Amino acid sequence: MRALKLLRNYIPWFVFALIIGIGYMFLLLKPHQTIDSDFGFIQEVFLGYGTVGIGALIGVFIALLFILIDRKIIKTQQLSRTSIITKRVLLIVLVVTIVIALHYILEKWLDLI
């Protein structure tokens, strides 16, 4: 019964993480124009695999991070320390957001990476 309850709680997060991963790969690869040749077919197959296959792998990684943060940080703390938990989670999210923003700026705008 406990396993079913855990599955019920984590499946929506897992689906959400898969959508994030596939959406990220879709934005990264961008919609492409189809070419009417054999090379165009091969290109379409590889871009489709990159969008769904690699995006799903990224989604699984994000889902594992969601579950680990929930099980190891949030669930292990006592309810009386909720403000400390909230501060920790917000700090983790803030640090990850800053790292991603710096990487994006260095890669796209300054062309250093």
Image: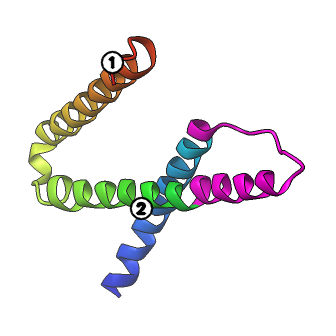
> Few, some or many C-alpha atoms within 10 Å of disc 2 (few <14, some 14-19, many ≥20)?
some
How busy is the neighbourhood of tag 1: few (under 14 within 10 Å), some, or many (20 plus)? few
Q: How is the image coloured?
A: rainbow
State which tag comes first along the sequence, 2 or 1: 2
Q: Quadrant of the N terminus?
A: bottom left
Q: Residue 100: which quarter of the image?
A: top left
Tell me the residue at 12%/60% (across/down).
Answer: 76
Q: How many labels were placed on the picture?
A: 2
The structure residue drawn at horizontal position 82% and vertical position 57%, both measured from the top left corner, is 38
Amino acid type of disc 1? Leu
Q: Position of residue 73 (x, y in %)?
A: 16, 53
From the top left corner, tell me how far across and down residue 4 is, in percent. Answer: 40, 82
Element type at marker 1? loop
* x and y, in percent, of residue 68 in the image: 24, 59
Provide the residue designation for mark 2.
60
In the image, taking residue 66 as reference, residue 46 lies left or right, namely right
Span highlighted in magenta in the image: 27-52
* Residue appearing at x 45%, y 56% in the figure: 59
Q: Which residue is mark 1?
A: 112
Relative to 69, is 35 on the left or the right? right
Q: Residue at x 52, y 54 (%)?
A: 55
Judge whether 102 appears above or below 97 on screen. Answer: above
Magenta-drawn stretch, dominant element (helix, strand or loop): helix
Where is residue 42, by image quadrant?
bottom right
Three-letter code for the amino acid on which mark 2 is drawn: Val
Q: Mark 2: which secondary structure?
A: helix
Q: Quarter of the image holding residue 112?
A: top left
